[in-house]
Each structure stands twice: as structure tokens, then as C-alpha cells.
Amino acid sequence: MFRSEAAYAAAPQDDGGTGKDTKSGAKKLLSKRGQLLKPFLILLFIFIVATTLATFLMPSDEPFDTDEGKSAGHQAGKGLGNVEVIKSPADPRVYKYFVLDNGLQVMAVSDPTSDRAAAAMDVSVGHFSDPDDFPGLAHFLEHMLFMGSKKYPDENQYMSFLSQHGGSSNAYTSTESTNYHFDIVPKHFTEALDIFAQFFVEPLLGESSTEREVNAVHNEHMKNLQSDQWRGQMLMKTMANVGHPMHKFGTGNMQTLCNSSLTGTPSTHCHLTRKALLQFYTEHYAAPRMRLSLLSTDDLPTLEALVRRCFAGVPTRGKAEPPQWNEPVKPPNAGPRMIKYVPIRDSRAVSISWNLPPLFQYFKLKPTSILTHLIGHESKGSVASKLKKEGLIESLSASSDTSQRFMAAVEVSMSLTPLGLQQLDRVLSLLFHSIRMLKEQGPQEWVWQECADIARMHFRFKEKSSPSGYVVAIASNMQIYPPEYVISSGATYSKFDPQIISWVMNQLDPHSADIYVAAQSFASTADLTEPIYGTQYSLERISNESITRWWTGPIDPDLHMVKPNVFIPRDFTMLPPAADPAKEDPNTPPTKAVDRPGARLWYKQDIDFEGKNWKPKPKISMLFHIITPYAEDTPRSAILSMLFAMLYSDSLVETTYDASTAGSSWSLAPSGDAFSLTVTGYSDKLYNLLKHAVEPVVTCVREKRTCVWANPQRFEVMKDEMRRGFENSKKSAPHQRSSKRLGELMTKKAWSIDKLLYELSLTDVTLDAVAQHVQKLFAQVFIEGFVHGNADVGEARRFLDEVVMALGAAPLPEGDRELQEVVKLENGLVFAEAHTNPEDTNHAISLYYQSPFVGIKYDIMGALLGQMVGEPAFDQLRTKEQLGYIVACRPAPMSGTFPPSIPGLAVLIQSSFKDPKELDFSARRFLDGFVGNLSKTEGKVFEAHKASVLADILEKETSVGQQTIRFWGEIKKKRFDWQRRQHLVDALAPVTLQEVAEYAKELTKLQSHSLAVWIYGKGMEPPAELDALEGVQGRSRVHSVTAFKKAPPAYWPNQIPTPPPAPAAA
């Protein structure tokens, strides 16, 4: 996976099951959800950094203490003996840093309570080091490295081993580093680590794999061609100095890696690629440039011995230090620039970026945090508040990246309204005036202290993160920070240093900014074309007159310093346990605190008990499911509900933004036949946030007075934002389109984008219509609530009362609701259509098989089958057949409002060179072969897969939030199976291979209960007649979602379960 520059320092993103990720799908059994339509709101975010490094290098007589808070970067860990890693007081894990004789630096983490073990290796080389003749070579090596080693020559052994033992694996390539990582059940960690280690000792990098993996890289590139994020990133690279590696195309494709045309034969052009690959590996993959992090249940001496045994053979050859880049990032004398470009989606956005010298050395001082905090603030006095009031922007964000060796960057991004695009000069003037106001007032110690207090608070009560993500972050941080700070670097605020803050502030002016503006209206004036992605753009130097206008003159009086944050928690007192800890276990259910007409409240205090995998923290989660018959019962209702939720949330940003920065959050959104209200955060001040969040909901409408959310100007902004979101969803990737269409076909209440757009376009969708809808919406409700955390039962009831009082609704009979239902397939169906983005060259299919049986036995067999088929499908369809970068075969359970869940299996493929009928054929051929041979699976392999599913089911929760989600899922579904995990374990135990094989045969009967969605890419249309649609294979053609729903199809029965008796709270 190639890492976008937009996420240099972030933890790796989930590859959506489309990368080399063999994770079992068993966890889906624990929280199945119906596919209810949510508003599809897409805001363009492009991280742009492109000003000169040389122009703004810090002078030699730096006006601040250069020793305080400095990190030595890549050399940070050298020469250190015993290192005491700074960790959160809430962290029970133990750490040891050590260096092998070959120079490999290691951070070992021992966690005896963990259900998973993980390891990550970060190598300090990325696409900046690509040879000029082979753009994308570092990324190509990332693909090739896992294809076998001298000790383990089978190219699929690593992935197969992980798959059989509940593991997953992935990797990413960034500018200056490449990261490889995996996780697995601890029992098999030793063997997995040895296989992993050999990739860095003696990988095969086989010639037979070269052409195939070049195709994989090319397919990955092809899937990105219609992505505005990738296009914007490449445009930024095009603007960089040709002498700096920022200018390079890092992903690579067939052309750059094999010097061939797409019409040629790759095998005749790739003969030099492997030679370049071996040279690159030898030069850069040296032990001193590697950082290894691992986490397991073993104690530290055992882990150290394991590492020394497995990784002692990593060579020290090549370059021991990463390269340095001395050329400026921005072309010399380029000056301030404005780049206007044409996005694929209907987006209006502006990004203002500043490139600074590296600042990672000053991580203890946080010189940019106070500035991005203030520039990105949204309360009264902020530039965001002012721009919204003038109707110029939809949103604003400010961010900085100080974790790179070659630069630091500060960026401000805004999503513009049509008026904001017209008055871009006004937008930029207000932004720069707000920065000037901050500069004139100077660094404020109280603001810095607030940032420090919040960061330290979060670190103090830090939850355990997933082992895989955790080791990735540690290994990456080890390249930059001293080993004692690899965990705490983000929360370290050593002292307030106004000099360095002022220095950074002085760089943030229009003279040194590059401004990127995206809008489709630029198509007529864009006179340049970026060569890799084909993005149209224009380039102009910003005039001195514009800079003077933006930077001088009186500052608008509405722009002023924000006020101190009243939502920062100060009281972290934990309530004494109300229940006997000796009687508690992870499955002790919530109790009923309220059960009356119109409302039911569940309550559970988070208390400590023996065997618990986290320490209670002073936090509370309040979740309310406000059931109303009119939330999304029709497309019009869905539109009006979404508009209300957007308006309401937007109207409270000024008053609740501080809470969000202080670790609390709230949200109100339509969710099927209900509105979902969630308030979470630290227990101190959380009641105040709840009051702010619910007080203005409905009363104003009933009293016929103007509501704070009923702003005509913002209403038009929200309508436009919603319309563009819907239109842009039509340009989503073909595999996303196929999955969405599958959901629309398979669920009763799922409105198509076209229906929603039609309703939104009607002239009677007005602010008055929204107000009338709100009055109807909350006339009668049933509230199902759950309060979990550091609260007593009295507080929990008070929270519910606050919501009830704000709504002022009459009780709704609990059964008076329209249920979401799942289609019961009774034959084989094919739905085929052209992609709604006519420029996307990719095709896609979703081939879904629905189980004819339901119940916990089939839930578990569906999970087990998915565990067994996922990796072989990936190996055959992606690795061997090279159908495309996005390939997955996984469990696909579907749920209505209530149980039962309907098990299923789905194959998802996106390809740039095979059409849907060919993809469908390949998927069916693989499944037929797999299912036909399933009964021949070796007994020990089958038992390993069972053990993997069992490990997933029994994986311990590591935070109160995970337990909240599990219990809330049972409450919302009204299944109330508090012992669900044990029941799944009991169902899994007797399952035999023969049963799974027979179930798989029944499940994959194509003509009996399957639905295929075929999406045709650019240049192809599905034939109009059924007979002309090859590959149907006895299945019926679905011509229209609307016609299919009107028929209507059969639905699985769906009835409200009876709540079991539960102990009442005192």
C-alpha cells in the first residue's frame, strides 16, 4: 500500500479488506448492523506542502534555546544504555529498548493480558530514494518483500500462516520510510516472527514474482486515477523543485517500473527491474536503518532472546544513515503562488500551506500546536466563525506536521460556499488578518497551557490501542524521537517558549504561502495538465497588490482571541463502586434504571474487578436511540431529517467546539427509524455538554419562535453541501458503487441517490418544511438509552430526564415503528449498470451469496467459512490471476432492525482490464473449486481455522468503550444476549469440517440465492437485453432497483423480541 503524503505521520489506515489483510471476519458476529442510509457528505481534503526550505532555514543565531526539547532524530537511540520509556499511568504494559550488535534498534513490549501479538519493522527509506530511472521502486519492493525468503521459500507461506492463525498483515511506503507489520494470536507469534524476520535477512525477491507484482502496483495506481486526494497530491509534487525528491511520482506503475507501454508485453521490458530492485534493497535495507517494535504476552527477557535469535542475521551492509535532502522543496525564486485546479468531484476548496525547516527536534516545545489550535478554532471570535456568518465557508481546519526529517508544514484548509469561491479574496483576507491578529497579540501562555493540560489529560487516561497499530506507531516514532519518548512524544510539553512560537508565527504570512484552489468552474481557464493523473490546472504568481490587501489594513473587530475553555475537565474523581466487584465479570449486564411508557434506560457503572483488561477511567458514554416513525420512512423524510441534523449540529459549533477540544463529543443524526444522540467524554463537565446539545432541539418550534438552528443562510449552504455530497457519491470507486447498490437492493428502506437528489431538488424543501418536519418528528418518541461509565444511577436518570424534557414528546408505543427488513433471495439475480462516473476506467463486481439458513449455528459457520476462504481467494484472484488491486472474499451478514442476522458470503473485485462478466466468472470458478475441495482440508488446518475464529470471539475488550459498543448493540437489536460470546463459543465447538463443507455447497448454489452487482467502467455499457448479457448462468436480470422493490421481493421475518427480565437499578 502506498502511503499518501496526506497522512505522513498518521497510523496506517484500514485497507478495507482490499490489501494483504487476512483478518478473520468473525468479529462481525458480535456487532452486526443493518445497512441504513446515511448522508453521504464528502469534503475535499488535500494536504499541500510546497514552499521553499532554503529560504526559511533558521538562522544560525536562533532566538531560542536549541537544546531544550530537541530530538537527535535518526541517531536518537544510539549510545544509550538502560532507557526508561515514559508511559501513561494507565498503561500496565512493560517496555524494554535495546540495540542488536548489527545496529538494529528494538522496542519490546510485554503485555500478559493481550489476546494478540504484533510486530512492525520500519525501514528509513521511502520513495524519495527511488532511482530516477525507476519511479515507484521503493513501493514495488514493499510488494515484493513478502514473496518468500531463502529459509521460507514458498511465496505464500507468510500470508497462509497468518490466515490460519487469525493473523493479518500489511505494509505502506511513505516519503522517507517503509513500514511492514503483522499481528497474530500469541500462541503462534514466535513462528510468525521468524518468517517475518527472514524478509529482512535474506528475501528471495524472485524473478518469477517481478512481472506479477509490477502488475499489482499498476493496478493500485489505476484505482487512484479518479481520486481527488491522489490527484491533488501529485499536483503538489509537480509544483515542487525538480531537484528535490518531493517532485517524484512515488506510487509507480507499469510504465515507470518496466519502461513499457500498456500495449506492450511487460515480460519483454522488465528485465532490468529486478536488478534495480536488488541493488536498492542492498543499498538501503541495512540493520542500522531499521526500527523493530513488537508486543506479545511473553516477558521481556523471552522477547529479547527471540529478537536476538531471529534478527541477528539482518545485514549491516549498504548505507547506515538515511539520505539527506539539501535542495529546497520549492523552486528557487518561485515566490507566492496560486494554483487553481479542476477536481473530479464537485468540490470547492482552498488550502493555504507553509513549508518550514524540520521541527521534530523541538517536539517537547510544540511550537506549532498553539497556532493550529487558534487558527482552526471555531468558537466566537475565530476566523471560522466569522467566515461562516458571512456565508463564505462550509468548514475550516488547521493542521501541522512536525514529524518529518526533511521539513515541517502548516496548512489551513477550507471548504467554500459558492459565495466563498466568488469572494475568495475576502476569504483569504480574513484568514490572513486573523493570523496577523494572533501575531500582534503574541504567544499566549494560557493558550499553550490549555493545549498542554488537554494533551497530558488524554495521555494520563490513555486507552490501550490495538497491538498492530501500536507497534506500527512505535516503530515509526523510533526513527524520529529518542526511545524514552516514542510513546509520550505527542503529550510532552516541557515549557512555554514564546521565542520559537513567535518564530513559527512569523513564517505564516502570505509572502511565503502557496495557495491551492479546487473548483470545477476552473475547467475553462486551466491551461496546464499534470502528466501522471491528467489534472487540469493553472498557475499564477500572487501579486504584491493582493498580498498587501490580505496582510495590511484594519483587522475586523469580529476577529479576536478566543476565550478560555470552560469544558476542560478538572475533577477526575472516580465514584466508589455501587456493586460488589467480586460478583462482576466482563459479561455482567447493564441494569434497568428506567422502564416507563416512552422511555427505557439501561445503566452500568465501570468498576474494577479481577481479570479486567482496563482500569476504570473518569469517563461516561450516553447513548440514546430516539425512535420516531418519521425519521427516514420516505425519501423526503430522510432528506428533511438529514437537513435538520446538519443545521442543528452546525448551529452549536460555537458553543460546543471547546468541549470537542477537551476530549468530549456529541452527535445527533438520523439512523433508520430513529435519531441517534451520543454524548461521550470525561465525567466532569459532561452534563453541561448534554444540556448545550439538547436544549434548543424542539421547544422553539412548538413555541413558534425562531430556532437557533433555523438560519436561512446556513440552510442554503447545507442544501448545497448535501446535493454535492450526493452527486459526488456517484463518482465513488466502482467497488464502492457495487457495494452500495447491493445494500439498496437487499434492504427494504434504502433510498437511492437519485431518489434523494430528486427530493432535495423540489421547491418545497424549505426551512419551514424542515421546522414542520421536526415538530412531527418529535411529537411521539420512544427513547432507548444506555449510560455507561463513571456515573451513578441517579446521574444516569438525570441525563435521560434532560433529553426527555428537551424533546417534550408524547410516549410512542414501542411497537409502533416501521422495521428495516432484509430481502430473502429465492433465486439467482444479476444487476448490471454503467458506472455513474463515465471517466472511471475500472469495472467492479459484488457477488453475494445469501445463506438459506439462520441462527447462531449458521452465524458461526459463516464466520468459519469466511476465515477459511479469505486468504486463498486473495492469493488466487489477486496474486496469481492479477485481476486487480481490490480483491476480497469475506463473510457478509445482513441484519434488519432486529434479529435474526442473515449470514452470507461476498466476493468483491475491481479491475481495470477485465469486465464484470469476466470477473464474475473468475469469482465463481474460484469458489466452485474451493468449495469442491473444502472437505479435503487437512484436519490440523481446519482446527487451526477454528482456533482462529475462537480467538477472535474471545478476544478481551481493552477499554470501556469496546464494552459499551457490545452492550449497546444488544440493546438496540433487543437481542439482550449478554452472553453472546459464550454462546458463539458453544456453537463453534461441535462444528465439523464435513458440516462446513456441506453448508458451503448449499450457500454457493448460484441459481438459488445469489445476487451479483456488475458495474461497468468507461467505454462499456451492459447490454439492454437479458439474452445478450453473457455470464448470467441461469440467473434472472434485475433491470432497476425501483422495479425490484415494487415487485415486491420476499423479506426475512422481523419481529420485536421480548426484553428479558433484568434487575432494576437501585
Image (cartoon, helix red, strand yellow):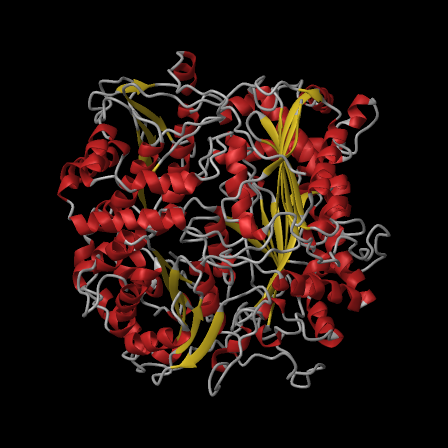
Q: Is residue 29 above or below residue 281?
A: above
What is the count of numbered marks?
Answer: 0
Q: In which quarter of the image is residue 674?
A: top right
**Residue at image x 78%, y 57%?**
433
Out of 842 and 372, give the one closest to the viewer.
372
Quarter of the figure that contains the C terminus? top right
Left or right: 907 as drawn, with respect to 934 = right
**Residue at image x 50%, y 48%?**
586
Q: Position of residue 881 (x, y in %)?
A: 21, 46
Q: In this view, does 557 lie above or below 552?
A: above
Q: Where is residue 646 in the image (x, y as percent from the top left)?
A: 66, 35
Out of 628 and 543, give the one closest to the viewer.
628
Q: Is residue 149 visible?
A: yes
Q: Position of residue 179 (x, y in %)?
A: 39, 65
Q: Position of residue 711 (x, y in %)?
A: 76, 32
**Residue at image x 54%, y 81%?**
72
Left or right: 148 as drawn, with respect to 483 = left
Q: Which residue lies furthest to the top in this view?
A: 1047
Q: Is residue 846 visible?
A: no
Q: Is residue 702 above or below residue 75?
A: above
Q: Is residue 274 above or below residue 933?
A: below
**Residue at image x 55%, y 67%?**
330
Q: In which quarter of the image is residue 304?
A: bottom left
Q: In which quarter of the image is residue 56?
A: bottom right
Left or right: 733 as drawn, with respect to 277 = right
Quarter of the figure that contains the N terminus? bottom left
Out of 898 and 536, give the one closest to the viewer.
898
